[in-house]
Image (spheres, rainbow, N blue to C red):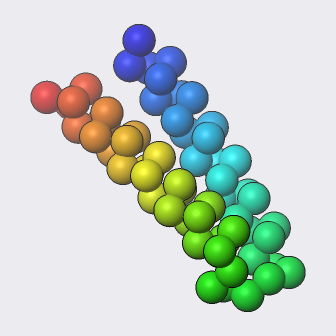
Amino acid sequence: MFLSKSLKLRREIESYRIQLYKQSKNQKLNDPVLVDMSEKLDQKTAELQKMIHIMMA
């Protein structure tokens, strides 16, 4: 269960990173869309770190 969920989170994180990179080339860094994507990326990364911490315990 943890493994499949962590893999899903990793894919989502990678997707957000790619989208953020592609959009940041064409827009200002304080653009609301980029800020929202960055916040989502931070949230997903925190979820993954929490899950890894639980699995290691």
User: What residue do we see at 55% from left, 39% from top?
Assistant: 10
Q: Position of residue 32 (x, y in %)?
A: 65, 74
Q: Position of residue 15 (x, y in %)?
A: 69, 47
Q: Residue furthest left?
A: 57
Establish if 39 lies above or below 3.
below
If the image is split into quadrants, where does the N terminus sit?
top left
Q: Nearer the viewer, residue 17 or 33?
A: 33
9 left or right of 21 in image = left
Q: Position of residue 35 (x, y in %)?
A: 59, 72
> Which picture quadrant has residue 29?
bottom right
User: What residue do we see at 58% from left, 47% from top?
Assistant: 13
Q: Residue furthest top?
A: 1
If the image is split into quadrants, where does the C terminus sit?
top left
> Which picture quadrant has residue 48?
top left
User: What residue do we see at 33% from left, 44% from top?
Assistant: 49
Q: Position of residue 52 (x, y in %)?
A: 31, 35
Q: Residue furthest front?
A: 32
How many numbered discs, if any?
A: 0
Establish if 21 lies above or below 1.
below
